[in-house]
């Protein structure tokens, strides 16, 4: 009986050793994880004086987790007395500065940024142009809080009815808005900067 028990224990030990060797061999030889293509795009529309750092950070965390590109979209309102494609120097300068601030923040998260600008007669008109022209998988939007400027409940309801894909709505508590970075020499010219330079009057 004792001899049989010893034999069983020996066989069990051999089986465990074989299993360990197989597992180790698999870990050594298994193929490396294929990197994500990063084709997902997260749309982040914002207004000139209503750029929420908390909503931006939430969008950046989502983009980082999903290996996605953040698409921050500055929505510009064009007065009725001007053509829709008229140069907007003041809004152009502000948009460039805010897009740069977003890109600086995105660098800390390791998230690529594809900055955009869409214009319209109203912010909702600009948003309509955005969802018609841009490819995206998700929208992250900051709802206005405490009577401050931003997207109000009607805007959010309109987006829910008209935008495709997933949508995340955040209503941050009262906070300071993210402003443009401090000016410095040799500021990098982004694609948005170049587009505005072409449109601006000489």
Image (cartoon, grey):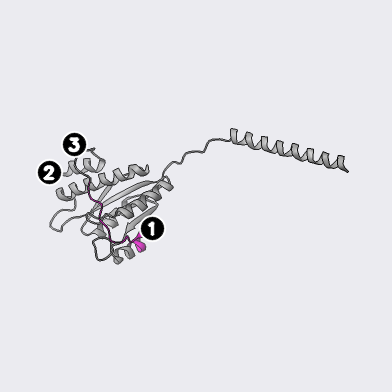
| Mark nearer the viewer, 3 or 1 | 3
Q: Earlier in the sequence, mark 3 or mark 1?
A: 1
Q: Residue extending furthest front?
A: 2
Q: Name the residue under label 1.
A: 167
| Mark nearer the viewer, 2 or 3 | 3
Report the quarter where the N terminus lies: top right
Region in magenta: 159-180
Q: Residue 133: horizontal and vertical position, in percent?
A: 31, 51
Q: Residue at x 32, y 54 (%)?
A: 54
Q: Which residue is drawn at 26% across and 46% down?
A: 101
In the rendered image, which quarter is residue 157 located in? Answer: bottom left
Q: Which of marks 2 and 3 is nearer the N terminus?
A: 3
Report the quarter where the C terminus lies: top left
Q: Inspect this view and state whether residue 105 appears.
A: yes
Q: Is mark 3 on a helix, strand or loop?
A: loop
Vertical relation: 155 (above or below) 5 = below
């Amino acid at each position: 009986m004792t001899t049989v028990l010893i034999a069983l224990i020996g066989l069990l030990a051999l089986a465990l050793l074989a299993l360990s060797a197989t597992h180790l061999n698999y870990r050594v030889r298994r193929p490396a994880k294929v990197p994500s293509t990063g084709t997902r795009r997260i749309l982040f529309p914002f207004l000139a004086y209503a750029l929420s750092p908390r909503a931006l950070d939430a969008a950046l965390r989502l983009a980082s987790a999903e290996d996605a590109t953040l698409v921050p979209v500055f929505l510009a309102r064009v007065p009725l007395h001007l053509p829709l494609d008229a140069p907007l120097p003041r809004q152009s300068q502000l948009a460039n500065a805010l897009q740069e601030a977003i890109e600086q923040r995105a660098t800390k998260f390791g998230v690529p940024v594809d900055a955009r600008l869409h214009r319209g007669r109203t912010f909702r008109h600009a948003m309509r142009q955005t969802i018609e022209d841009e490819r995206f998988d998700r929208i992250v939007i900051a709802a206005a809080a405490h009577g401050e400027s931003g997207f109000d409940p009607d805007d959010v309801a309109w987006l829910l009815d008209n935008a495709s894909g997933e949508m995340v709505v955040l209503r941050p508590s009262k906070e300071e808005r993210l402003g443009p970075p401090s000016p410095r020499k040799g500021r990098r010219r982004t694609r948005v900067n170049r587009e505005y330079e072409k449109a601006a009057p000489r």
